Every structure is written in C-alpha cells, then in structure tokens.
Amino acid sequence: MTRMKNGSAIFQRATYNFSQQVTDLLDMTISSSATTIMNELNRINPAGATQADYGMRHAADILESARQEEGYDRSQVAILFTDGQPTSGSSFEDDVANDAISEAHRIKGAGGTVYTIGVFSGADGTVPANADALENYGVSEENRYMHLVSSNFPDATGWEHITGGTNKTNGVS
C-alpha cells in the first residue's frame, strides 16, 4: 500500500503560507479510483505565494524518513503542482527556485522520481535535449525551472548548476 498526502487547512503566519501544506494521509491502493484521488486534490485550498522550496523540503524529508523504515521497498515519487513562480511574494525568485531544485535533487539522488505539473499559460513539457538547449534556446524561465525540479534533469542542483543531459522521463506536464 502507498500513501498520498493531502492538505486542506488555510493558515497564514508571517512569511509562510500553510494553505498548500500537505497534512493528512490518504491510503492509496492500485484499486483507488481517479475520482477518489481528484476529490482529495480538490480539497487543497491554494492561496498566497508558491514557496516550492518549503514544499520540496517537506517532501524530501517525508521520503527520507520513509526509507528509514525497516523493510521499506517502495517507489518514491514527489509531484509538484505549481504556477511556475517559485516565490515568497508575487514574482519569480532565484533563491526559492535554487532551494526547490536542491531539495528535488535530494529526492532524485536517493532514487526517487520528481514530476512537475505546471498550471500556467505557456507550460511546456517538451524535454530539451540537454542543458545547453534548456539555457539557450528560448525556454521560458518558468519552464526551465519546471524541468530542473523534475527528473528530466536528474543532476540539477540549482538554478545555475545544470550539468549533463536529460533522462527523458517527461517529468514535466
């Protein structure tokens, strides 16, 4: 059995918005229906900044903790739903992007897979051929960020630290 986390409460404090924080566990089996999953996702109440770095850190910590369980032998997957703007305010912030990519690298480095789903105009899941194509051939800032967080670029450790090619998993939607 695998578990999916779901968040629903809206709490705001200082600079951190807890509205998107995942808190409840939902038991998932192969027979779980798409309706059940969608109902749980629809319980999330988005509001405020997209602190993707905090979300990815939370996911990496949960997955790391799960690997410590005796007899643990499951696939590890993190899915980032985002508007493509890693921020603590209202516009793209390199520091938040760097930290989110770094936390995603923790997951990927431990054998996990990271998928990103962009909910914004111009979201493009086409996987660039390599790091050079990602940086130099018209890939938008948001799409570049999405690819670096995802398993498309397994060795990415930050916004400016792109090495190697892709693994062509199409981890971006």
Image (tube, grey):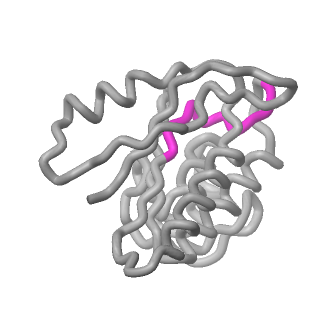
17 relative to 114 in the view: left or right:
right
Residue 82 seen anywhere in this rendered image of the structure: yes
Residue 123 seen anywhere in this rendered image of the structure: no
Quarter-of-image position of residue 88: top right
36 relative to 45 in the view: left or right:
left
Q: Nearer the viewer, residue 117 or 68?
A: 68
Q: Nearer the viewer, residue 152 or 67?
A: 67
Q: Residue at x 76, y 62 (%)?
A: 160
Q: Residue at x 62, y 67 (%)?
A: 105
Residue furthest out toward the front = 70
| Residue 84 placement (x, y as % from top left) | 60, 36
Q: Main secondary structure of the magenta part?
A: loop
In the rendered image, which quarter contains the C terminus? top left
Q: Nearer the viewer, residue 157 or 130?
A: 157
| Residue 20 placement (x, y as % from top left) | 59, 30
Please determine whether, in this image, residue 160 is positioned above or below residue 86. below
| Residue 97 placement (x, y as % from top left) | 72, 48
In the rendered image, which quarter contains the N terminus? bottom left
Q: Nearer the viewer, residue 116 or 27?
A: 27
| Residue 126 placement (x, y as % from top left) | 40, 51
Q: Residue at x 27, y 48 (%)?
A: 28
Q: Residue at x 42, y 43 (%)?
A: 25
Residue furthest out toward the right = 14
**Which contiguous range is marked in magenta?**
80-89
- Is 85 included in the stretch rendered in magenta? yes
- Is 78 included in the stretch rendered in magenta? no
107 relative to 116 in the view: left or right:
right
Quarter-of-image position of residue 47: top right
